[in-house]
Image (cartoon, helix red, strand yellow):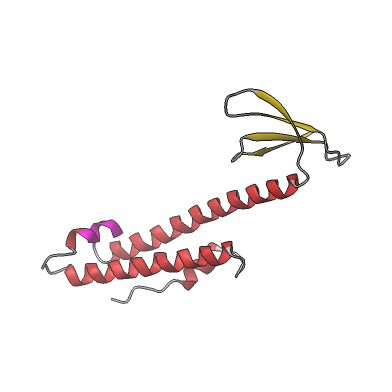
């Protein structure tokens, strides 16, 4: 027996893959009661969809982490504590305002491109690029 968990529905489906049998499945409903259901015909599609979602979540975390490193490195190169510290210099006259606002626009552009790539992948308009390929598509900061 193989157990498949579909977390969004909180169900554990049982399937004997060696025989390809559709057998009764069991799960606990929201109230905690044990119930018996018939295994849906599209169990593999459900499992594949859940696995694809998990893969996309892990991929997104990895991309976001690498982008954050890139942003912080640029900020450090310009003698800021990190990319978030540019906010201290935006919105009032000071010697760093222009640079901080320029960095802010660059950051917004970076995240907009990353989100567009993610949307294109989800929509099936492009294959999922590697993290390095995503980083290569991002503009560099022009001092």
Within the image, what quadrant is residue 111 found in?
A: bottom left
Residue 86 among those drawn in magenta: yes
* Residue 114 position within the rendered picture, expressed as x and y whole percent measured from the top left: 46, 65
Q: Which residue: 17% across, 68% down?
A: 97
Q: Which residue: 37% across, 70% down?
A: 109
* Residue 81 position within the rendered picture, expressed as x and y whole percent measured from the top left: 25, 56
- The answer to whether 141 is drawn above or below residue 63 in the figure is below
Residue furthest toward the right? 19
Q: Magenta region: which residues?
A: 80-87
The answer to whether residue 82 of the structure is visible from this angle is no
Q: Nearer the viewer, residue 63 or 18?
A: 18
In this rendering, position of residue 43 left or right of residue 18: left
Residue 104 among those drawn in magenta: no
Q: Nearer the viewer, residue 140 or 126?
A: 126
The answer to whether residue 7 of the structure is visible from this angle is yes
How many numbered discs, if any?
0
């Amino acid at each position: 027996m193989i157990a498949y968990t579909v977390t969004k529905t909180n169900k554990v489906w049982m399937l004997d893959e060696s025989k390809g049998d559709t057998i009764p499945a069991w799960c606990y409903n929201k109230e905690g009661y044990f119930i018996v259901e018939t295994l849906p015909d599209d169990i593999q599609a459900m499992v594949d969809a859940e696995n694809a979602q998990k893969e996309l979540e892990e991929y997104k975390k990895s991309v976001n982490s690498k982008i954050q490193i890139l942003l912080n490195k640029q900020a450090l190169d310009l003698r800021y504590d990190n990319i978030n510290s540019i906010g201290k210099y935006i919105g009032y006259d000071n010697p760093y305002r222009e640079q901080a606002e320029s960095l802010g626009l660059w950051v917004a552009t970076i995240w907009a491109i990353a989100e567009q790539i993610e949307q294109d992948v989800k929509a099936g308009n492009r294959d999922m690029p590697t993290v390095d390929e995503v980083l290569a598509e991002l503009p560099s900061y022009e001092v």
